[in-house]
Amino acid sequence: MLLLNSVAENCPSDKCTIAINRTECVERLDNIPPDVLRQREAKWLDMLNSWDKWMAKKHKKVKLRCQKGIPPSLRGRAWLYLSGGKVKKEQNQGKFQELDSQPGDPKWLDVIERDLHRQFPFHEMFVARGGHGQQDLFRVLKAYTLHRPEEGYCQAQAPIAAVLLMHMPAEDAFWGLVQICEKYLPGYYSAGLEAIQLDGEILFALLKRVAPVAHRHLKKYKIDPILYMTEWFMCAFSRTLPWASVLRMWDMFFCEGVKIIFRVGLVLLKCMLGSQEKLKACQGQYETMELLRSIEPRYMQEAFLVQEVSPTHIHLSFGTCMH
């Protein structure tokens, strides 16, 4: 089986499985009655307070609860636990403070500074130039360049760090970023982009199985995966999907690994390019790229996406997209 380096650590058993669950009713978190949400919070608190036991003996239950959606009040803490960031932080006490106190490499600091105002500029944390959100984002990204000087800074790390900062303090966000860069998406942010290119090849190979019509179309017009999937994968869809969908995808991503990113990418490609009818309007490379830059909102909705990527059994038809 063809395996990719960035999958290896995260999904040992079903790296190339694209699973769809249509039997389960998928609910939006904002539609859940308050009493049900309180019950879920209590369940998550119980899990977080006995985390090692749950991960060792009841991982399937943890996975199911991540698919249902982590309660907003506990999302940051849960992400840190799921990613292993909590353990990293405990193993490296004082490390972030040490990095935070260092001046940093000017060549990276200038680039980071220029990127700060571009990250979620309408979010209250980042709306003010020099505000606390932008300051914390600078601290986290600078600390990472000192933690991994051979890797430095990549612009796609900024939205990742910003999403983390919306849910946790700067030190926790730093360790969350470390885990994403080193465990979930290793090599994605290194010069040369070899890892992302390899994963693009894997995505294209999977697309041939999942959506042969889309695969033939992209091949016909010589549209390399790197052209459409780079921002999707490197930013973990944080700059592509509606906010509610981003959070639900990240809930599953932190639990199940990069295969969630693959599934989302395949769903979007299948839904946008998966039938001859859909392809009539994009007979060319430019038209196809424009279509993929303006994905139909219905395919990015929280309930639809969660249903399409939540695995219970192997299903490769993605039939919902054809309606």
Image (spheres, rainbow, N blue to C red):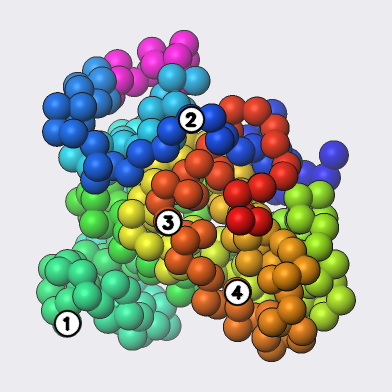
What is the three-letter code of the residue carrying label 2?
Glu
Which is more foreground, mark 1 or mark 3?
3
Name the residue beneath numbered marker 1: 129
Return the residue nearer the eye: 26 or 132: 26
Label 4, label 1: how far apart the Cα atoms are: 32 Å
Q: Residues within 10 Å of mark 4 (few under 14, many from 20)?
A: some
Q: Which callout, 4 or 2, points at the residue further toward the start of the chain?
A: 2
Q: Which callout, 3 or 4, points at the residue further toward the start of the chain?
A: 4
Q: Residue at x 60, y 74 (%)?
A: 292
Name the residue beneath numbered marker 3: 301
- Residue 296, horizontal then vertical, whole percent: 51, 69
Q: Residue at x 48, y 49 (%)?
A: 304
- Residue 8, horizontal then vertical, whole percent: 67, 40
Question: Which residues make up the magenta segment?
Answer: 47-59
What is the three-letter code of the residue carrying label 3?
Gln
Which is more foreground, mark 3 or mark 4?
3
What is the three-letter code of the residue carrying label 4?
Leu
